[in-house]
Image (cartoon, rainbow, N blue to C red):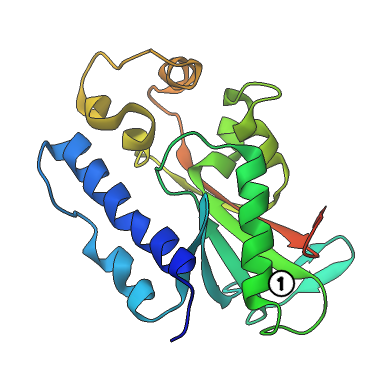
């Protein structure tokens, strides 16, 4: 399709991420989420440096942000953060800029809606990230416009890895310690849906 080698390599790095996650969780080489890759074959998910994005449409109710309305069916990009290492804020900004350049001819207007749906945006977790940290800066860019709750902590593996099933959870990081304090009977878990507008250089929210 004439895409650059850089785009191809950045996108295919996700195979290594998924294999390494599988190795960490199950002590086996393989991929436990094969359906995840279908959007690569459809050419609707691409990697741009630190982040990857779905080229898609806003799938739910209209959202107002910075005086603009993003309606159901409007063109958006939806971000994901692959497990390639630390979440460096400046690297994410570079990803937004590269993604904007890639899709700028595919939508009307100068402002691109960028969405991120993740456990990181779940309201109950917002104080678990250290002030001034890369993660705190990253999630602060998104206006949360909805969330889903569950009784089961489905994302525990993202914080504790293969030790998530153990009774004595590891407490090596401040984030792990925060979740250990939070986990318990009657607690709710889930993920949030966030959005901001991007003009190619600046985040608008």
Q: Position of residue 48 (x, y in %)?
A: 53, 60
Q: Is residue 159 left or right of residue 3?
A: left
Give the SS element for disc 1: loop
Q: Which residue is mark 1?
A: 62
Q: Is residue 142 above or below residue 162?
A: below
Q: Is residue 107 left or right of residue 81?
A: right
The residue that appears at 69% across and 60% down in the rendered structure is: 97
- Callout 1 crowding tier (Cα within 10 Å): few <14, some 14–19, many ≥20: some
Q: Can residue 61 be seen in this snapshot?
A: no
* Quadrant of the image occupied by residue 165: top left
Quadrant of the snapshot with the C terminus: bottom right
Q: Position of residue 156 (x, y in %)?
A: 35, 34
* Quadrant of the image occupied by residue 64: bottom right
* Nearer to me, 62 or 197: 197
Q: Is residue 199 above or below residue 187?
A: below
The residue that appears at 46% across and 35% down in the rendered structure is: 188
Q: Position of residue 171 (x, y in %)?
A: 37, 13
* Nearer to me, 106 or 177: 106
Q: Position of residue 31 (x, y in %)?
A: 19, 55
Q: Can residue 90 be seen in this snapshot?
A: yes
The residue that appears at 44% across and 16% down in the rendered structure is: 173
Q: Is residue 101 above or below residue 133?
A: below
Q: Residue furthest front?
A: 5
């Amino acid at each position: 399709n004439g895409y650059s080698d850089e785009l191809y390599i950045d996108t295919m790095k996700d195979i290594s991420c998924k294999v390494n996650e599988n190795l960490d969780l199950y002590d086996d080489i393989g991929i436990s989420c094969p359906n995840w890759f279908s959007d690569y074959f459809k050419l609707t998910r691409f990697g741009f440096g630190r982040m990857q994005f779905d080229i898609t449409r806003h799938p739910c109710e209209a959202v107002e942000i910075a005086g603009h309305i993003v309606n159901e069916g409007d063109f958006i990009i939806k971000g994901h953060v692959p497990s390639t290492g630390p979440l460096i804020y400046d690297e994410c900004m570079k990803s937004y800029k590269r993604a904007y350049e890639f899709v700028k001819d595919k939508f009307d207007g100068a402002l691109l809606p960028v969405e991120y749906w993740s456990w990181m945006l779940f309201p109950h977790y917002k104080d678990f990230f250290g002030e001034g940290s890369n993660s705190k800066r990253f999630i602060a860019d998104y206006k949360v416009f909805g969330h889903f709750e569950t009784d089961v902590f489905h994302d525990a593996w993202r914080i504790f890895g293969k030790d998530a099933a153990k009774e004595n959870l590891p407490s090596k990081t401040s984030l792990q310690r925060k979740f250990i304090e939070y986990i318990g009977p009657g607690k709710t878990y889930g993920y949030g849906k966030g959005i901001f507008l991007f003009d190619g250089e600046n985040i608008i929210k």
